[in-house]
Amino acid sequence: MTEAARPVHLRGRSVGLVFVGGALGTAARVGVSQLVDPVGPVPVATVGINVVGAFVLGWLLERLARSGSDDGWRRDVRLGIGTGLLGGFTTYSALATDTATLLADGHPASALGYAVGTLVLGLLAALAGIWCAGRRSGGPR
């Protein structure tokens, strides 16, 4: 089977874009996490990372969708930046682990606020990113 005949998720180029983007996103997340101290028991770096990542992903995917079909450079950007970079940068698995740790350490109110707050803020950030991208392009598609 030729490379072009393979499904996109099995093509070497696609896998490479996600790999490189994911490595860069993970490095950026680790850097931010090391720079931002927790507030009390709550790891606010994780909240910020997930909210910023949700906004950028919402904006990016909306801009790409409005600019044409998911092929060529648009697909490369979606895979490299959307799936790779932002997938490595955001860390909803850490959200689950941090929530469990807060619960285990006897901070149930902080755990609940952290988990629900991060999810709600992430959703609102993604919607804001979509809205900003739509506003920039001049309206609905």
Image (tube, helix red, strand yellow):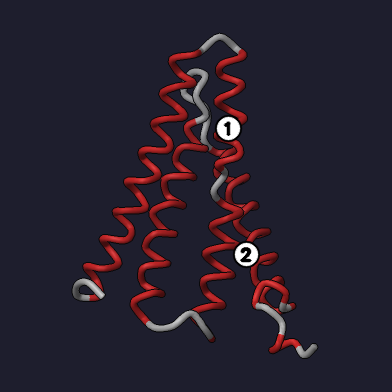
Task: Residue at 65% x, 67% y: name it.
Answer: 18
Q: Vertically, is 104 above or below 71?
A: above
In the image, what residue occupies the spot 37% across and 46% down? 123
28 sits to left or right of 127: right
Residue 6 versus residue 76: which sits nearer the camera?
6
Three-letter code for the amino acid on which mark 1 is drawn: Ala
> Which quadrant would residue 1 be assigned to in this image?
bottom right
Q: Which residue is mark 2?
A: 21
Residue at mark 1: 96
Do the residues bearing badges 2 and 1 touch, measured as CB atoms within 8 Å?
no
Q: Residues within 10 Å of mark 2 (few under 14, many from 20)?
A: many
Amino acid found under the numbered disc labelled 2: Gly
The image position of residue 34, as x and y in percent, is 60, 38
- Look at 57% across and 39% down and name the residue there: 33
**The C terminus - image quarter:** bottom left
Determine the residue positioned at 71% across, 82% down: 6
How far separated are the C-alphas under marks 2 and 1? 23 Å
Is residue 82 shown above or below 101? below
Task: Place residue 68 in its image quadrant.
Answer: bottom left
Report helix, strand or loop for mark 1.
helix
x and y, in percent, of residue 32 in the image: 55, 44
Image location of residue 8, percent across then percent down: 65, 77
